[in-house]
Amino acid sequence: MRRIAKKATAAALASVMVIAAGSHLSAAALENKTDKPIAKNVIVMISDGWGYNQISATDYYQYGKLGTQVYESFPFQMGMSTYSVGSYDPSAAWDSFDYLKGSPTDSAAAATAMSTGEKTYDAAIGVDDDGSVLRHISEDLEAAGKATGVVSSVEFSHATPAGFVAHNASRNNYSEIANEMLKYSATDVIIGAGNPFYNDNGDIKTSVSESGYKYVGGSTTWNSLADGTLDVSDANGDGIADELDNWTLIQEKSEFEALQTGETPSRLVGVPQVATTLQQARSGDGKADPYAVPLNDNVPDLATITNVALNVLDNDEDGFFLMIEGGAVDWAGHANQSGRVIEEQIDFNKAVEAVNAWVRENSNWGETLLIVTGDHETGYLTGPASGTETDPMWMSIVNNGAGVLPGMEQRKPHQQHNTSIC
């Protein structure tokens, strides 16, 4: 398959590259602004909605102690900021306990900051504060001849996956974004929820209105995708025919499981049989402890869809770029669902373990750059009895032992302005 030629720009993720696991970048290379080596494979994993306390709470629940996740032993660890333009005053944040409850950044602005290296306004997808189109790192690496992909546990046209492929004034234009991703990008793998025929419990719907197709680009796009006739002949929109293969669509859990190994199509869209999220939005007591409500059993987990994406993308001899999002840590944080925050973070952690296993078995840390991060914190998660407006004291999450919900409080269903990463 011929890659679409595009003019390359500076690597957009240079500002966060020092957090990579297994990177072969030397200190001299990190200081050199003009001659950074490009890894053969670049994998960016984003737990949407995590901060340091989401990691701690999950550590305690899974293992009863901190420092247990593979990314917590990575050689480079640091924090980064993804707040939207003009929205954050660090002095005020440290002086006032309530400051972070107002005017939070959102996933679209955060994803755009990570994908392009430029901060922008809330809801912006791949455009700057003036609405001008920005260049995604995926476009740079496509120009370098690499395959590209995005996967998520929420809808594939949602803010984070869209923020690494599409360009739109508003994240809420889901159908426009889905069509750009499917018809007008050179992306090779797109996987995420948003199946129009299923609800959040994975049950088939009795009827579907046109609005039910919005996350997949509308009924016409979906039907063409399903029968293999979706027109992708001019993916870069320049009026010249491009030699891109048509998409192969998979939906059933068994299809995902089978494609973790073996032969693959050259371009793959995966839309599991669920509406908005793989698991977080399922019915039942949303405030229950982790796994008290049975999981949807008809959908793959994030580790499985990650393995599928890797199996497709590693066919490219020039390497690949892959963004993997655990999207519903954010959603659970918005709903102040402590148990489901931990469920979703565990799902993300298992996907990180899957990537590490893939690197060990199929690549090496000299050619593959892995970045594990979050885009912002959601829910203002703190330990019990944390501060007030007049006494901004942030207490730690309380360890109650493995398998027991730790002591934790969520203050408001909003994101903080600052991203915490490990």
Image (tube, rainbow, N blue to C red):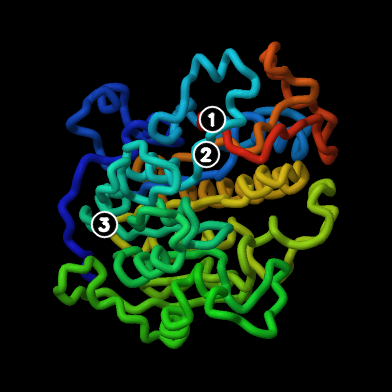
Q: Are marks 3 and 1 in contact (CB under 8 Å)?
A: no
Residue 372 visible to the viewer: yes
Q: Which one is in front, 103 or 394?
A: 103
Q: Residues within 10 Å of mark 3 (few under 14, many from 20)?
A: many
Q: Are marks 2 and 3 in contact (CB under 8 Å)?
A: no
Choose the circle earlier in sequence order: 2 or 3: 3
Percent position of residue 340, x then y: 73, 48
Q: Are marks 2 and 1 in contact (CB under 8 Å)?
A: yes
**Mark 2, residue position:** 374
Residue 373 visible to the viewer: no
Choose the circle earlier in sequence order: 3 or 1: 3
- Residue 244 shown left or right of residue 386 in the figure: left
Choose the circle earlier in sequence order: 2 or 1: 2
**Mark 3, residue position:** 142
Percent position of residue 194, x then y: 56, 68
Q: In which quadrant of the rendered view does residue 300 lie?
A: bottom right
Q: Which one is in front, 421 or 286?
A: 286
Q: Which one is in front, 395 or 106?
A: 106
Q: Nearer the viewer, mark 2 or mark 3?
A: 2
Residue beneath the point at 42% across and 79% down: 221
Percent position of residue 233, x then y: 25, 77
Q: Look at the picture and state if 58 lies above or below 346.
A: above
Q: Which mark is residue 181?
A: none
Percent position of residue 158, x then y: 49, 57
Q: In which quadrant of the rendered view does residue 27 lie?
A: top left
Element type where label 1 sits in the image: loop
What amino acid does circle 3 point to? Glu
What amino acid does circle 1 point to? Ser
Residue beneath the point at 44% across and 43% down: 122
Q: Which mark is residue 420?
A: 1
Q: Nearer the viewer, mark 3 or mark 1?
A: 1
- Residue 263 shown left or right of residue 408 in the figure: left
